Amino acid sequence: GAGVSQSPSNKVTEKGKDVELRCDPISGHTALYWYRQRLGQGLEFLIYFQGNSAPDKSGLPSDRFSAERTGESVSTLTIQRTQQEDSAVYLCASSPLGGTSYNEQFFGPGTRLTVL
Amino acid sequence: DAKTTQPPSMDCAEGRAANLPCNHSTISGNEYVYWYRQIHSQGPQYIIHGLKNNETNEMASLIITEDRKSSTLILPHATLRDTAVYYCIVRVVSTSGTYKYIFGTGTRLKVLA
């Protein structure tokens, strides 16, 4: 079956513009995560959606960052008034129902964002 | 949140076992240890996870110390395709009951021919 998909694969934008990144999780996966990975760095947790629970937004670095998810489907990560420091690969992952010990995340290929 | 510490890089000869260490000294009793790897320009890939018992699957073995403050990922017969960045991760449970994965900076494993 299809894996996690993300679009666009690459995005170049000018400083100050808003961008929207999209994630299509694996069908039936209730949990969805967004991460940021700067060049040569590890993954930085941004936000987590689990079913109808309130999302865990504790990783969002500023109020310029927001994310939404409609039910258990598509999610969009929005960055307003982009800054050069926002340049990174943004990774989305989904996983089956949480609450069990086994909760493998399946990652998408990422969106490479470059802010000029 | 519990955090992990890993050496930044390691080399391993092809065909030999690769032993990747990880310290997670602040881990709590209900927090699992996960390992993922990331091959250049791809999304991370799940390898294995465990709570307190040693685990083995077709990819690797995970050895967790009795006090759970450290663990070792073992690739029994490393191949050139195992060259990647390996992340040791602690899965924490937030106060709302949701899961969050804390990634470290990872170990860059280079398998040498």
Image: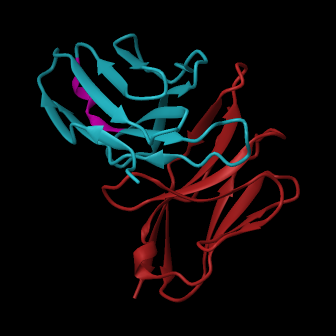
Chain colours: A cyan, B red
Residue A116 seen by the camera: no
The percent position of residue B13, horizontal first and vertical second, equals 49, 86
Q: Is B23 placed left or right of A90 in the picture?
A: right
Tally the numbered discs.
Answer: 0
Q: Is residue A26 above or below residue A67?
A: below
Q: Residue at x 58, y 15 (%)?
A: A54
Residue B69 seen by the camera: yes
The percent position of residue B66, horizontal first and vertical second, equals 88, 58
Q: Residue at x 46, y 82 (%)?
A: B79
Q: Is residue A106 above or below residue B40?
A: above
Q: Nearer the viewer, residue B54 or B7?
A: B54
* Quadrant assignment for the C terminus of chain B: bottom left
In magenta segment, residue B82: no
Q: Is residue B52 above or below residue B58?
A: above
Q: Nearer the viewer, residue B99 or A59?
A: B99
Q: Is B99 placed left or right of A5 in the picture?
A: right
* Quadrant assignment for the N terminus of chain B: top right
Q: Is A100 placed left or right of A48 in the picture?
A: right
Residue A53: quadrant of the picture: top right
Q: Is residue B63 above or below residue B101?
A: below
Q: Residue at x 49, y 40 (%)?
A: A94
Furthest-top residue in this view: A63
Q: Residue at x 87, y 53 (%)?
A: B67
Magenta highlight range? A82-90
Q: Is B87 placed left or right of A15 in the picture?
A: right
Furthest-right residue in this view: B66
The percent position of residue A70, horizontal first and vertical second, equals 42, 20
